[in-house]
Image (cartoon, rainbow, N blue to C red):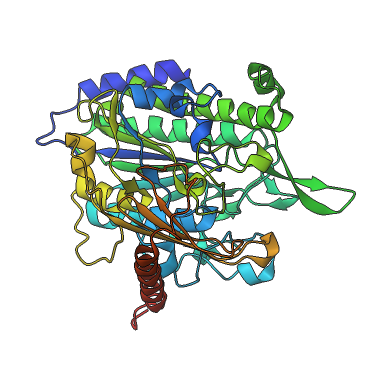
Amino acid sequence: MPRTLLIFLLICLSFSAPPRLHASPPNFVLILTDDQGINDVACYSSEIPTPNIDRLATEGLKFNSFYAASSICTPSRFGLLTGQNPARSQDQLLSALMFLPEEDKDRGLRPHETTIAQVLRDRAGYDTALIGKWHLGHGDNKFLPTNHGFNSFIGHTGGCIDFFTMTYGIVPDWYHDTEHVNENGYATELITEEAVSYLESRIQDRASSIETPFFLFLPYNAPHFGKGWSPADEAPVNIMQPQAADLKRVDFIQDKIRREFAAMVVSLDDGIGRILDTLDETGLAENTLVIFMTDHGGDPKYGGSNRPYRGDKATLFEGGIHVPCLMRWPGKIEPGSNTNALTWALDIFPTLSHFAGADISDLTLDGENIAPIILEGTPGNPDREMFWETGKHAHLDRGNWIALRQGPWKYLQDPNADTPFLFNLTTDPIESLNQAPLQPERLKEMQSRAEEIAKKYRASQNPPPSQ
């Protein structure tokens, strides 16, 4: 049956359904992109065309001071899904989990580390699905999303895959729930197709008086580089993997790597457009909060850009953690609105729980409910405190970073620098002037506070005695 006819018939069924006695809890579509910096989205001043992502800004709310939970993939996802600072994680998920080394095959998200999917499913009756990249554990089914609150999972577990073969090099890494499957196509398009199918399946519920709300987590692996295979070296290799037709769409970009990156972005943008169109066509949009954000800053080595901010992926300068975030909820969020409220990925967990009516009073969370900012345009708390830590990673030649933000002030310890940094982000958002020599007392206080928080989080890593 043609897709358009199927949608028409299902919508007709929804109109003939018995009236609901009360409004349903909202649906959530959480879109997370990979290695996409703030200068890689058009509505944040990028030269790369992203008209569909920009629709979310035109039709909803644009965040101007939103931060990722980390500047690295794995801890960023941990913070987003658990609402806890990654420094609390039992397995110290402060750097990227590597797919092949044996030592990383028994590390990941643990049973006591509660995800937003578990809360929405078990406490609010949601159907939960993850389609895309996981990167919170692999090698054992205990780490798969279906054991952490998701009713269904389609996608991959490693940090990246070959976009055409759905393998990590030549190692299979594409799942349907807990089983490996062979897929051919283009990863970005496969993720989109699965998401569209999932959304179309949800409107069948509208033919009954009981409508199950859903949480669709859609972590695309684009525009992160692909993990190809080098026959000469008999080893996996990092490679940009755009499609030829998409390269033609961005041929105005002169730099080769930037052009390849941009081609992967426009394909991603097409997919997000299909998601938004499907929500609109099925009538699901009215009761669906769509969130778009990126996992951290971009990597210029592979074409990403974080301009005008200093630093990149895997650093804790602004370029590594200050990211795009857009939200659309028709009838709830004022179209074309902006907020400068200081917010971050850890706020998503308590906020979605609030909208779903889920009781989370027993959980330890490090984010805040930002519903008033989203719905009422309140300014939030400009003096709030945020802490970041990334771990040492010998394989990737990365050191340990620490950063603390208190209102406009930011303390930063860079492992590659001899002295710490102190910035006033209100007067110096691009971190050009180190005020550490000018503010010795403030530097000392913030350094001490950062060490105190790090110690506190390390003490909370172990599971409860009952686990």
Q: Which residue lies furthest to the front in this view?
A: 438
Q: Extreme left residue here?
A: 21
Q: Is residue 380 left or right of residue 439?
A: left
Tell me which corner region of the image, top left, top right, bottom left or bottom right, holds residue 359. bottom left
- What is the total number of numbered labels drawn onto the structure image? 0
Residue 175 picture location, percent across and down: 57, 49
Residue 443 % position (x, y): 39, 64
Q: In the image, is residue 347 above or below residue 195?
A: below
Query: Which corner quadrant of the image does residue 199 belong to?
Result: top left
Q: Give the percent coordinates (x, y) of residue 120.
A: 29, 52
The residue located at (69%, 43%) in the rendering is 162
The quarter of the rendered structure image containing the C terminus is bottom left
Q: Is residue 301 above or below residue 284?
A: below
**Farthest-out residue, bottom:** 465
113 or 146: nearer the viewer: 113
Q: Which residue is at 34% across, 21% downward?
A: 58
Horizontal side of 235 relative to 121 (left or right) equals right
Is residue 316 shown to the viewer in this render?
Answer: yes
Residue 326's place in the image compared with 66, above or below, is above
Q: Which of 185 and 306 is in front in this view?
A: 306
- Is 196 on the left-hand or right-hand side of 314? left
In depth, the one of 321 and 124 nearer the eye is 321
Residue 307's spot in the image, x, y percent?
A: 53, 35
Q: Is there any visible trace of residue 100 in the rendered image?
A: no
Residue 144 versus residue 376 in the image, above or below: below
